[in-house]
Amino acid sequence: MRNMWTIARREYKLFFTNPIAYVVAFFFMIILGYMFFNALAQANIYAMYGQSYAPGPDIVTGPWMVILMVFAMPAITMRSIAEEVHTGTMELMLTAPVKDWELIVGKWLGTFMFMLSLLAITWVFPIILNRFVTPGIDQGVLLSGYVGLVLMAASLVAIGIFISSLFNNQVVVFFVSLAVVLILWFVISPMSNTSSSMGSQIMNYLNLINHYSLNFYQGTIDLSDAVYFLSITAFSLFLGTVSIEVRRWR
Amino acid sequence: MIEVEGLTKDYGPRRAINNLTFQANDGEILGFLGPNGAGKTTTMRILSGFMPPTFGRARVAGFDVVEKSLEVRKRVGYLPETVPLYRDMTVFDYLKYMADLRHIKDAEDRVDDVLGIVHMTERADGYIGNLSKGMRQRIGLAQALLHEPEVLILDEPTIGLDPAQIKEVRNLISEIGKERSVLLSTHILSEAQQICDRVLIINKGKIVAEDTPERLQAGLTGVQRIALRVSGDGDGLEKLVGEVSGVGEVSKIEEGVVEIDCPPGKDLRPTIARKVIDAGYDLLELKNIDLSLEDIFLELTRDEPELPQMDDSSADQPASFQD
């Protein structure tokens, strides 16, 4: 447990010396900042014609945020294990008295905390927006959206850490992670949603983004969605731990 | 305390180490010698808990490396051959991190201590990426010493150091080796000669010799060789010396110099000296020629006919030793 925190703390601190982390943060800020600006400008135009338009929480919890997260995840998780293997420091980790799961969960936690920091900063937009909009934006929808984003971040980072433990090359990790997340995003049953066959239900359930966009984003917190994200997280971390163990035996 | 029994490791079809059995007691420095690719690093990786063996058992500080890997890792200080370090951390942060992972009390004080031991205190705040090879080597060593381990496993610890540092590190290892067991690999033979209590020579994954450096030198050669030098051209010297009882082959090396093979354990020098002087030669020099560890090493690790269980890939490994 203690080792997990030690590793997480180092991992988190390291992001502040890592150029990739700054690039990711830059994209978050510039794109969300633009969306924010756009929303205000649009409201302004509406106001010129005497109409009223109020931008909502979706400027930060909307589709752009999902796209940002999907692309940011491979970028910030790709180095976590792959780099240690590549530079040989994995030998230090595996000969230190650290359990394999402590290493994986520690890595995940540090990266997840960095994602949380990024998400926390984006909160500034709805806070400002709230001052311009009467009677204020819907805080419930905003909160539910952020809960969903946090859960989604947890599972995305876990997937990234697992894939990072499979390869020695960070570029490979980046593209494989991206591919996996895109598959999880676009996996939908070829049958229509109305089909109630077991197979199509499973496929629809697996869709990662739907669990966010159909519920949390709309303002409903559904326990089954939370369970989905948490199981993806736990399962990926489990696979990551197995992958480290397999690495030893190879 | 390191106990190894029948240790074997296969990498796919290639057998890296084959049925190693040896022991290192507390207060003993065991040198691990062998050409590149002999299996030194593989053995050390198994003993440090990095990877399990294919067959065989190893116990370090009383714990099995497979079943009680975590206990072993708590008690072992390990310096890998490649000295992996986090280049984007400062020296102090790195050591503090490793100390925290080992749950060391007053970690910062201990980090200061080991930095003092390896003389790196003034570079504590520098980034590891900016350090020279020798300095990194010292940081790696500091890391291995952090938790005052019962067993120290050092893979080529003096590589990349300058002569003064090599001397210091050797002294340090000797100091540590007084109470704990140290296993160190090297291909610098004089180093093994100087600091190791016992030497283990391995080649192609097998132990080919195991003894103290002194005994290796004496015992393995089979014959004791003596060099004799007289003034002048030394005509008839060979014949004269050959008459001494017990003397084996006598060969002339140059004008006035011969080398004499004698049976081991019997010093024929006084007899030879008397005989030579009585015959009217001016005796200049009469000395034992020690086969150096280098010679023994080369002798033992020379290319032997391929063993049946070895496959072709191991033949690619250069058997001659490279420094």
Image (cartoon, coloured by chain):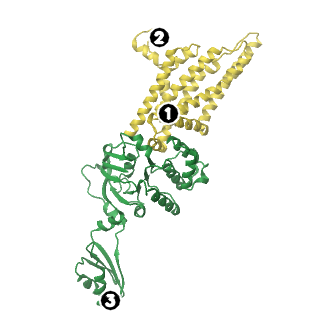
Chain colours: A yellow, B green
Residue A197, given in percent of the width and then of the height, sits at: 40, 10
Label 1's element?
A: loop
Is label 1 or label 2 in front?
Answer: 1
Q: Residues within 10 Å of mark 2 (few under 14, many from 20)?
A: few
Which residue sits at x=54%, y=22%?
A151
Tell me the quadrant of the picture where the C terminus of chain B can be found: bottom left
User: What type is the residue that disc 3 sits on?
Assistant: Tyr
Which quarter of the figure has residue A239? top left
* Residue A75 appears in the rendering: no
Of residues B77 and A147, which is closer to you in this image?
A: B77
Of residues A231 and A30, which is closer to you in this image?
A: A231
Residue identifier under label 2: A193
Residue A69, given in percent of the width and then of the height, sits at: 57, 26
Residue B281 is tagged as 3
Residue identifier under label 1: A1
The CA distance from mark 1 to mark 3 is 82 Å
